[in-house]
Amino acid sequence: MTRATTATPHQVQAFAKRAWIQQGGMTLWLSALVGAGIGILALLGAGNVDMRPGMETMIPNQTLHLATVRDSLGEVQPIASYLLIMTPVLLGALVGIVATLTLPGVVADDIHGGGIEVLLAGPIPRRRLFQSYLGASLILTTASWAMAATGFTTATILVALITGISVSVTFPFVAALLILPLSLGIWSATATLFGALLYPRSLESRAGMNGGPIRLLAIAPSLLTAPCLMLLHEWALPVLALIFSTTVAASALIVYLTARGFRSARVLDS
């Protein structure tokens, strides 16, 4: 019989519990505040900009079908609508950044504390071990996304009730709000795991890189999703399905390559 190569729920839970103890509380509070700030900025801050003449010509009308913000008089607010449409991308970038910050901390603690040597010497296959790291990071990033989405939704509802603004959204927008942050979180966590275990020095901060090339690679897709969402708005659902399937396939391949290419001496000497 061959040994299982899929991480068990108990292993993922143990790694996730430790990550939560180390960084969970602050991460979730920060995510909730950022999500609420995005909601307030989209409706209140952009509302003041919309009052200036000629602003409606800056946003293509065909992109406003995903989500629309109207003032108390029923007039469309193009800048506020545009920022609302960009919310899935902004929340996705937030989740991706959280993944790049939490996972290296857990891995580094094992490396410097000697825990990874004990784990590698045990009967757990490498791929299962790395899947446990990845699963723990995904749990924390998913919780971060949930808090950010909750903060955004709560702030949006409160602002709409207080100011009389009305917000209408479509199913593709709701799907983007779910799929984009999840996809970007999976990719960021996987890319960061790849860097932390194979090229630890790539996570070191350097002038002009703001966190190293691996972190730049991890959050780069968030810069590409905005034009995809805006330019391919008529194909929003197929594009979202393609983004999610590509992310899952690429992440599975990276975990496989990480398990094959991992060398403990390279990490322990860093």
Image (cartoon, rainbow, N blue to C red):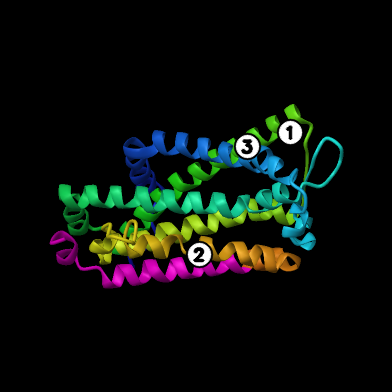
Residue 189 image point, x, y percent = 41, 57
| Image disc number at residue 30 | none
- The kind of residue on which mark 3 rests is Ile
Q: Nearer the viewer, residue 201 or 252?
A: 201
Q: Helix, strand, or loop for circle 2?
A: helix
- Queried whether the magenta region covers residue 259, the answer comes back as yes
The quadrant holding residue 190 is: bottom left
Instruction: Examine the structure image and report whether residue 171 is included in the region drawn in magenta.
Output: no
Q: Position of residue 27 (x, y in %)?
A: 42, 39
Label 2 sits on what residue type? Answer: Pro
Q: Which residue is mark 3?
A: 40
* Whether residue 244 can be seen here: no
188, above or below 140, in the image: below
Between circles 2 and 1, the one closer to the viewer is: 1
Quarter of the rendering occupied by the C terminus: bottom left
Q: Is residue 34 above or below residue 228?
A: above
Q: Is residue 215 visible?
A: yes
* Residue sitting at x 72%, y 64%: 233
Answer whether labels 1 and 3 touch (C-beta < 8 Å).
no
Instruction: Of the two numbered discs 1 and 3 on the same chain, state the one appearing first in sequence.
Output: 3
Label 2 sits on residue: 221
Dot 2 or dot 1, earlier in sequence: 1
Specify start and end residues of the magenta stretch as a single range.
242-270
